[in-house]
Image: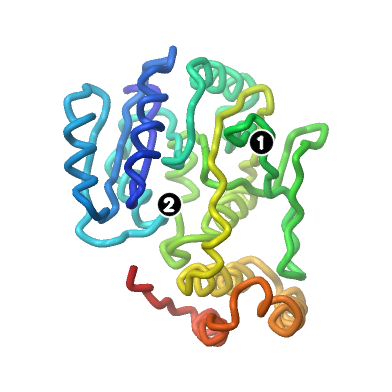
């Protein structure tokens, strides 16, 4: 059994993916395989990736004929690596991995616990630290973000930019919840893990570089829809009745006071759609 499988998705961002894979292939630690899924990209990106990396002994490239989004795409890779590896790393394609990161990170994770979820420090390309999601609030729509860590480095949940876990733990918690499609799936996974006593831990001694998402994503109807519909799904899944009721009061206040300035007035119609779909627990597939 090999030590590590790395899951990466490419979706119309081939240049980022190439930089990410090249940084992995230059790592001092080489006991890993890369599972790369081209998620229905345009402009022959799948062909370009195959030309560059298919001959590499440790890079397995697959292609989807439709947009599987984040949850289905990574679950596809997780099924591909079933029982073949001890650890799995879910990695964003817009990350850059320092040469000494993998070996040092795996060693430190093993010294703490083989049965937890781990995250390194995430830095911007200019070497400044990115803020991390830390404390969940099931009474409102807000979660606290920090750029520092508490004494034990324990946090409530992490993003998928770099997510390291023993594969046996994934088999017990199970895969990403496909109902989320994209956004909040990481919060759901970490809370499901926490209920089974698997904690989320930051190792600030190790770091990678990650490109922040652009601000214009808030103009996109699919982002508006999925981000807020999934908040409702998440609260229905993890909050009690009182928390769920209070969260809707915050929702109404947000729609009135902040939504028009943060998410463009043209997306208001999607706000009502995600409220209805979230309550009914259904999803709409954006055509992008």
Q: Name the residue: 77% across, 36% down.
A: 149
Q: Name the residue: 45% across, 39% down.
A: 91
Question: Callout 1: 10 Å neighbours few (<14), some, many (20+)?
Answer: many
The residue that mark 2 highlights is 175
Q: Nearer the viewer, residue 253 or 135?
A: 253
Q: Position of residue 97 (x, y in %)?
A: 49, 26
141 to 39, vertically: above or below = below
Report the side of 118 relative to 68 (left or right): right
Q: Position of residue 160 (x, y in %)?
A: 52, 46
Q: Name the residue: 41% across, 32% down.
A: 20
Between disc 2 and disc 1, whose residue precedes?
A: 2
Quadrant housing the C terminus:
bottom left
| Residue that sits furthest to the right in the current view | 151
Query: Badges 2 and 1: C-beta atoms under 8 Å apart?
Result: no
The residue that mark 1 highlights is 201
195 to 227, vertically: above or below = above
Q: Position of residue 209 (x, y in %)?
A: 55, 32
Q: Nearer the viewer, residue 216 or 225?
A: 216
Report the side of 196 relative to 87 (left or right): right
Q: How many marks?
A: 2
Report the side of 168 relative to 146 (left or right): left
Disc 2/disc 1 C-alpha distance (Å): 19 Å
118 to 216, vertically: above or below = above
How is the structure coloured here?
rainbow
Question: Callout 2: 10 Å neighbours few (<14), some, many (20+)?
Answer: some
**Disc 1 secondary structure class:** strand
Residue 244 falls in which quadrant of the image?
bottom right
**Disc 2 secondary structure class:** loop
Q: Position of residue 30 (x, y in %)?
A: 37, 16
Q: Nearer the viewer, residue 80 or 67?
A: 67
| Residue that sits furthest to the top in the current view | 28
Kindly identify which numbered label has been placed on residue 211: none
């Amino acid at each position: 059994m090999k030590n590590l499988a790395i899951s990466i998705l490419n979706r119309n961002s081939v240049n980022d993916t190439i930089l990410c894979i090249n940084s992995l292939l230059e790592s001092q630690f080489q006991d890993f395989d890369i599972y790369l899924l081209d998620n229905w990209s345009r402009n022959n990106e799948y062909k370009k990736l195959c030309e560059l990396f298919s001959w590499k002994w440790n890079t397995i490239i697959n292609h989807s004929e439709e947009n599987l989004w984040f949850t289905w795409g990574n679950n596809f890779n997780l099924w591909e690596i079933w029982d073949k590896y001890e650890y799995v790393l879910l990695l964003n394609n817009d990350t850059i991995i320092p040469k000494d990161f993998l070996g040092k990170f795996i060693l430190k994770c093993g010294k703490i616990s083989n049965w937890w979820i781990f995250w390194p420090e995430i830095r911007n390309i200019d070497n400044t630290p990115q803020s991390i999601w830390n404390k969940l609030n099931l009474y409102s729509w807000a979660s606290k973000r920090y750029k520092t860590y508490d004494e034990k480095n324990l946090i409530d949940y992490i993003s998928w930019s770099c997510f390291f876990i023993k594969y046996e733990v994934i088999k017990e918690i199970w895969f990403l919840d496909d109902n989320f499609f994209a956004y909040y799936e990481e919060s759901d996974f970490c809370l499901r893990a926490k209920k089974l006593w698997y904690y989320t831990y930051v190792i600030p001694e190790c770091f990678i570089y990650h490109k922040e998402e652009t601000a214009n994503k808030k103009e996109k109807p699919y982002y508006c829809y999925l981000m807020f519909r999934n908040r409702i799904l998440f609260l229905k899944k993890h909050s009690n009745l009182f928390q769920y009721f209070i969260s809707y009061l915050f929702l109404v206040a947000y729609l009135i006071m902040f939504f028009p300035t943060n998410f463009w007035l043209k997306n208001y119609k999607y706000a009502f759609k995600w409220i209805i779909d979230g309550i009914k627990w259904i999803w709409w597939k954006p055509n992008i």
